[in-house]
């Protein structure tokens, strides 16, 4: 028991994301679109950081910079002590230590679910196909995904697809999971199932999660901290530590503390949304 | 007949029944239409000059044992497979290169786009001049018919790959080659299959016309129904010059069946190599 606890602690120490004055300008630096402007933020290891902010404020831009899908104009991003990108290295290399789960899902439709899940470790030569499949079966079973291994992603519901995708991400043993509104298209019932399943996964794997959402209830229910972004250009407006006890289940949604946190978040988000709206009116 | 035998498994019994009823009805109307003149003395326009299906079937029946007739099938199939095969083998890599390499695209695509609108049949005289043998000219023209279609589909498919697939493959440690092999290729596969089935149709159109033009010309030794250089197109042309209208219809229906067999084969192959696309 002791050893597992130590292991958990050791694992929890890895996976700090530190963003330092990140700037991203699309187009040319003089008159391009400033999407992110001197944004600084720290996501503690093994915790879930929920990122909320008005539509088009630059959240995805920030996530893509962490994932290494595009460069930063200036500033730096660190993963633990490693500089992912920064002065002299504007673009991070995509790597299996940071796996992205996309808004519309990116399971390969031409591979069965289990083939999808084993893709990473097999590609990297970490596991042989057989070992990988054994591990995949175990992990899928833990996530309640037995029986769909040999189906194609097109044959399962979008909620189940998203869970398969998270298992695929975890198979890479990443330090960080980057999620860009993964549950946006789901109905609220499915969503609540997803949430409890994600929390359980995180308790089991102690993984750092960077999670973009528009759903404030989701943000507070899942988050260890909620980062509220300003309207474009994106900057950290407010960082709210969520002191709700773990493990959480859906009953806390009705608790007083939850409502208080909700109000606090709502005020900050509403203020920014109004700003974004007025800005839009002026520009339009 | 082989194709009809496949129908039940593909479509279910009700669909098969409908197909058979429709074909039978069409044949009945055709029979009545072409015999109308014999019965009443007033020949119907268009349909009146066409021999009735009963006579066509009789002629067809007599052709079943005819070597020349089957030789025509064989030759046309050979040309279609040759031209189509070459178009796949050259068209897929060419289309991929166009889609994935900007420099190559900028260099080769304008020329390709200028040549593409030229109908394959407009190439017939030039092809006869270019190529040493009649057979090669026909093969070349057949090839052209499928080539453009396949290339355009491959380019379209490979250019519209969802970037997320490539991004997640990259993040999971895939090399450039792996991304090509495991992501670009399979996600282009649906378009390749569409290109192949459309291309197959075009190939049949082109081969028949090319056979009529070149096989029917004076440069050919006068084969009887089949012979060297024949093919179903030539079979039709030969029947026309020989005045056997029943054989013309036999030739036409044969081409219809041949085309149907070919596209069924492509579809079956497509379901095989891209099982995730199969409707549930
Ligand atoms: N490739 C690009 N080129 C130019 N501008 C871009 C590009 N991508 C995004 N933008 C702009 O940058 C801004 C931020 O976009 P981003 O996608 O990061 O916002 P977001 O916060 O994720 O929005 P949403 O909540 O709607 O997903 C937007 O105004 C968008 O129009
Ligand atoms: Mg976004």
Image: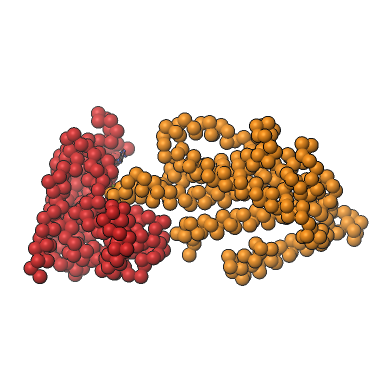
Chain colours: A red, B orange
Q: Is residue B158 left or right of residue A76?
A: right
What residue lies at 60% left-to-right and 54% top-to-bottom? Answer: B263
Q: Is residue A89 left or right of residue B242?
A: left
The x and y percentages for residue B138 are: 67, 41
Q: Nearer the viewer, residue B75 or A111?
A: B75
Quadrant assignment, res A45:
bottom left
Q: Is residue B216 left or right of residue A109?
A: right
Q: Nearer the viewer, residue A217 or B41?
A: B41
What residue lies at 22% left-to-right and 57% top-to-bottom? Answer: A173
Quadrant containing ligand 1: top left
What residue lies at 23% left-to-right and 63% top-to-bottom? Answer: A198
The x and y percentages for residue A90 are: 22, 37
The x and y percentages for residue A265 are: 17, 54
User: How many discs appear?
Assistant: 0
**Above-or-below relation of A197 to B159:** below
**Above-or-below relation of B93 to A266:** above
């Amino acid at each position: 028991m002791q050893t597992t606890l130590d292991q958990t602690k050791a694992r929890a120490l890895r996976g700090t994301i530190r963003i330092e004055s990140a700037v991203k300008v699309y187009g040319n630096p003089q008159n391009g679109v400033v999407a992110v402007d001197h944004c600084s933020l720290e996501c503690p290891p093994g915790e879930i950081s929920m990122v909320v902010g008005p539509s088009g404020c630059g959240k995805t831009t920030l996530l893509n910079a962490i994932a290494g899908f595009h460069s930063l104009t200036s500033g730096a991003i660190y993963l633990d002590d490693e500089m992912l990108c920064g002065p002299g290295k504007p673009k991070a290399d995509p790597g299996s230590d940071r796996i992205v789960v996309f808004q519309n899902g990116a399971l390969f439709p031409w591979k069965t679910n289990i083939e999808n899940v084993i893709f990473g470790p097999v590609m990297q030569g970490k596991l042989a196909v057989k070992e990988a499949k054994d591990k995949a079966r175990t992990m899928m079973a833990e996530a309640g995904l037995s029986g769909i291994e040999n189906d194609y992603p097109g044959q399962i519901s979008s909620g189940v697809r998203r869970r398969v995708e998270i298992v695929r991400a975890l198979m890479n043993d990443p330090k960080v999971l980057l999620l860009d509104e993964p549950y946006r298209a789901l109905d609220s019932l499915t969503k609540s199932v997803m949430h409890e399943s994600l929390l359980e996964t995180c308790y089991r794997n102690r993984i750092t999660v960077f999670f973009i959402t528009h759903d404030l209830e989701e943000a507070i229910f899942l988050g260890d901290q909620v980062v509220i972004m300003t309207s474009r250009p994106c900057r950290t407006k407010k960082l709210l530590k969520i002191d709700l006890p773990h493990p959480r289940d859906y009953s806390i949604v009705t608790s007083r503390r939850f409502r208080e946190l909700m109000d606090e978040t709502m005020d900050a988000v509403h203020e920014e949304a109004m700003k974004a709206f007025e800005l839009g009116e002026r520009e339009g | 007949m082989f194709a009809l035998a496949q129908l039940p498994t593909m479509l279910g019994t009700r669909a098969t029944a409908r197909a058979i009823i429709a074909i039978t009805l069409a044949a009945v109307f055709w029979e009545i239409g072409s015999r109308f003149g014999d019965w009443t003395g007033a020949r119907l326009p268009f349909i009146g000059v066409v021999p009735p299906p009963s006579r066509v079937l009789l002629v067809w029946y007599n052709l079943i044992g005819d070597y020349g007739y089957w030789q025509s099938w064989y030759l046309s199939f050979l040309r279609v497979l040759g031209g189509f095969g070459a178009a796949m083998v050259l068209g897929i890599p060419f289309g991929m290169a166009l889609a994935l390499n900007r420099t190559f695209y900028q260099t080769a695509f304008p020329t390709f786009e200028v040549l593409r609108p030229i109908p394959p049949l407009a190439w017939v005289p030039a092809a006869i001049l270019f190529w040493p043998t009649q057979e090669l000219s026909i093969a070349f023209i057949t090839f052209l018919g499928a080539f453009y279609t396949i290339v355009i589909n491959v380019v379209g498919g490979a250019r519209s790959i969802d970037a997320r697939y490539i991004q997640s493959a990259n993040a999971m440690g895939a090399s450039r080659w792996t991304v090509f092999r495991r992501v670009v290729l399979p996600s282009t596969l649906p378009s390749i299959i569409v290109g192949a089935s459309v291309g197959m149709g075009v190939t049949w159109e082109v081969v028949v016309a090319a056979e009529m033009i070149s096989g029917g010309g004076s440069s050919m030794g006068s084969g009887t129904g089949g012979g060297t250089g024949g093919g179903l197109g030539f079979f039709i042309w030969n029947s026309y010059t020989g005045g056997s209208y029943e054989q013309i219809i036999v030739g036409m229906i044969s081409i219809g069946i041949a085309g149907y067999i070919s596209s069924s084969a492509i579809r079956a192959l497509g379901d095989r190599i891209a099982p995730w696309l199969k409707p549930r």
